[in-house]
Amino acid sequence: MSSRSTFALVTGAARGIGKAIAIKLAADGYHVLINYRSNDAEAEKTIAQIVENGGVASLLKFNVSDREEVTRVLGGWLEQHPDSVIEVLINNAGIRNDNLLMWMEPADWDGVIDTNLTGMYNVTKTLINQMLLNRYGRIVNIVSLSGLKGVAGQMNYSAAKAGVIGATKALAQEVGKRGITVNAVAPGYIKTDMTQDINEKEAKVMIPANRFGEPEEVAELVSFLASRKASYITAEVISINGGLYS
Ligand code: NDP
């Protein structure tokens, strides 16, 4: 159990996988900072569920891809809370915008790279100094099977997630001596708004577990990697995909 003044920031935590992670980390004892981009109603629901379970959470709304906004809101939060420590960072905010390259417009490329890859840089860069000074930290980046295997129609998304995997391994080497671990979790198909357009009945035939995963199953793995128990695991990419790809 962590103390209540110890914070965990989960980006993209209003819905889906981020929401399940936020709920789990609050149950683990963290004061969870719930980041999201625009969906106030869903963010409020996430907080309500955490409070109902006896946890503590606050909202921290900013667009991870907007560097100025990250500095103003997240950097501002750090200045306003000089005695608080963000021990855990879960870079989960992500979008997909699929198309074959022949139809992929520059905006579709930029948007996916800016959110999934540059967003991770913007947020991690803002928090890393405090973790280094504190000589402790847990960073978990949510990537994807697409970033390991490459998926047709997802050149932008596969590139962004593969980029985060490279960044995970590089940063782990930079900060390992300071007690900070950096890992990536690569989900396959998980039941969220992001996969609503995919037919589970058709897609599950390829999955040994014969179903899509639940956000809560991803949250259990992230909770472990974010805990002190996972102290000797770093620079790893751990898949959670029901056996779809290994
Ligand atoms: P959802 O679409 O269900 O939720 C995405 C969350 O991210 C929302 O809370 C959204 O905010 C937030 N978000 C999106 N863009 C930004 C931004 N620019 N700044 C801040 N927050 C943002 O997605 P999932 O839960 O399915 O996905 C979570 C992560 O898991 C993503 O990184 C995704 O790529 C990855 N993933 C998902 C898989 C799946 O099968 N679902 C498989 C593999 C990886 P708001 O609510 O305000 O819109």
Image: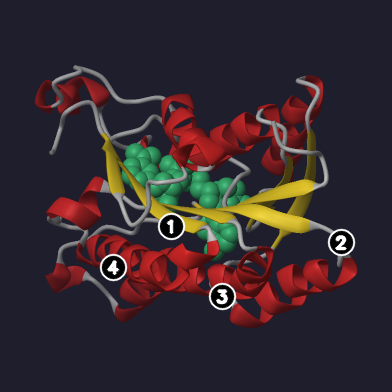
Q: Position of residue 235 (x, y in %)?
A: 33, 57
Label 2 crowd bin: few (<14), some (14–19), many (20+), radius 10 Å: few
Q: Position of residue 143 (x, y in %)?
A: 35, 52
- Residue in view at x 25 percent, y 63 percent: 162
Along the line of sight, the residue nearer the viewer: 5 or 54? 5
Asked if residue 83 is positioned above or below residue 46 in the image, the reply reads below
Label 3 crowd bin: few (<14), some (14–19), many (20+), radius 10 Å: few
Question: For numbered disc 1, what is the local secondary structure?
Answer: strand
Q: Position of residue 16 (x, y in %)?
A: 51, 37
Q: Amino acid at mark 1?
A: Val
Specify which label sits upstream in the sequence, 3 or 4.
Answer: 3
Specify which label sits upstream in the sequence, 3 or 1.
Answer: 3
Q: Which residue is mark 4?
A: 166
Which image quarter: residue 243?
Answer: top left
- Residue in view at x 65 percent, y 53 percent: 87
Along the line of sight, the residue nearer the viewer: 10 or 202? 10
Mark 2 or 3: the one toward you? 2
Q: Which residue is mark 3?
A: 125
Along the line of sight, the residue nearer the viewer: 201 or 135? 135
Q: Is the CB of the residue bearing disc 4 within 8 angstroms of ligand 1?
A: no
Disc 2 versus disc 3: distance between alpha carbons? 19 Å
Q: Which residue is mark 2?
A: 83
Q: Amino acid at mark 4?
A: Gly
| Side (left or right) of 164 relative to 22 | left
- Residue in view at x 72 percent, y 37 percent: 2
Q: Which residue is mark 1?
A: 182
Disc 3 versus disc 1: distance between alpha carbons? 13 Å
Could you tell me which quadrant the N terminus lies in? top right
